[in-house]
Image (cartoon, rainbow, N blue to C red):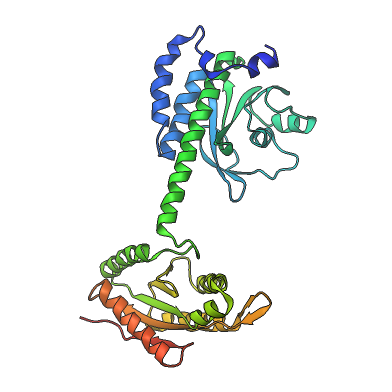
Amino acid sequence: MENKEVRNESASQFCSGESCRLGTITPLAKQINCLDVKRIADLCITEIPQLIGARLASLYILDEASDILHLEKNNHPFLINNIVSLNQNPPSPMVAAIRSKELLIVEGDQSLRGPKISHTHRQYAKNYTSNCCIIAPLVCHGRVVGVLNLSDKIGGEKFTHDDVAIIELFRQLIGASIGNINLFEKTQRQAKTDGLTGMLNHRTFYEQLEIELRRSQRYTTQLSIIMVDIDNLKPINDGHGHRAGDMAIKQIARRISACIRQIDIAARYGGDEFSIILPNTSLEDATVVAERMVEMVKNTPMVWEGNRINLSISIGVGQYDGGGGISDVTKATDQALYAAKQAGKGQVKVYEPIKV
């Protein structure tokens, strides 16, 4: 079969002489159109290989931020890479296919379709356990979102003209579905986070606080709250502009995040206010964290257009001790914050634990 013939194959031509597969392809295509990546992975590893008689399959999902492929699912009886970097030099056949965004067919040391395999690529290809494999980059709106690998044609045969067309069809469908999942998850994250700082927003803070209060009640654990207010943000906005004010907010958000643990929950509570939930934390330990925040912000002034701008925060610390509810603990902590502001700013004030 000539390269040109394979390259011009369209998905609509695959059923020539094999129309019996239509009965399987149509419902399978409908199942792939979903927002469940686990379900899609199951279909890629179990159902799609059966259509073309492939014994082995693996699905990788691309983390675009790091240019790393993460293994989602496979059926190999031997270990394969859990992560694959796209920054390989020289690239493996899989990475070469992803860079070209073209489906790649490898038979032995020959590339029948897709990017030409150099001598170095062929050395990588020898690592495959079969003499014939299909590497199908999954693309959505011109961006690679993953890759589906299929190999070991049952019976030792080569993949056919129709096999290639089927995979062309499904790689488009899978790519579109994974792209939709990524978009949905991004939209969900944006709905829960503050656009300027990347922290949780006000609404999500209260949702998380309710969860942590219930956990504290159930397991009788301590729960502390920190509320932070930026001192003198208005003079920064008035004197240097709102872009400088935004930079101050972002810098302070980073300093706060640097002072807390992974299990702690930080949110932008309002324009110049932040709130932090500290699970399993005593009032004394929370106070130490708060004092560390004040010192870190104080000792790292902001430089804006050549001007050194000193930053300062005031903090109130409160604790939930098994009684009352969300409004009680936030009101108490807010009162401690007010006391810190009244004490001259750049201060930490503590409210006693709430008991009912």
Q: Is residue 189 left or right of residue 109?
A: left
Residue 288 locus on image (x, y percent): 46, 83
Q: Residue at x 63, y 29 (%)?
A: 102
**Which residue is farthest right?**
119
**Which residue is farthest left?**
356
The residue nearer to you, when weighing 54 against 103, is: 103
State which quadrant residue 80 falls in. Answer: top right
Residue 281 locus on image (x, y percent): 39, 76
Q: Quadrant of the N terminus?
A: top right
Above or below residue 74? Residue 153 is above
Above or below residue 190? Residue 140 is above
The residue nearer to you, when weighing 251 against 349, is: 251
Residue 73 seen by the camera: yes
Residue 53 seen by the camera: no
Q: Quadrant of the C terminus?
A: bottom left
**Which residue is farthest top?**
17
Q: Is residue 267 left or right of residue 148?
A: left
Residue 181 locus on image (x, y percent): 45, 42
Above or below residue 77? Residue 202 is below
Above or below residue 101? Residue 285 is below
Residue 51 locus on image (x, y percent): 48, 19
Q: Residue at x 69, y 45 (%)?
A: 87
State which quadrant residue 109 falls in. Answer: top right
Q: Residue at x 70, y 36 (%)?
A: 92
Q: How many marks?
A: 0
Q: Is residue 192 left or right of residue 127?
A: left
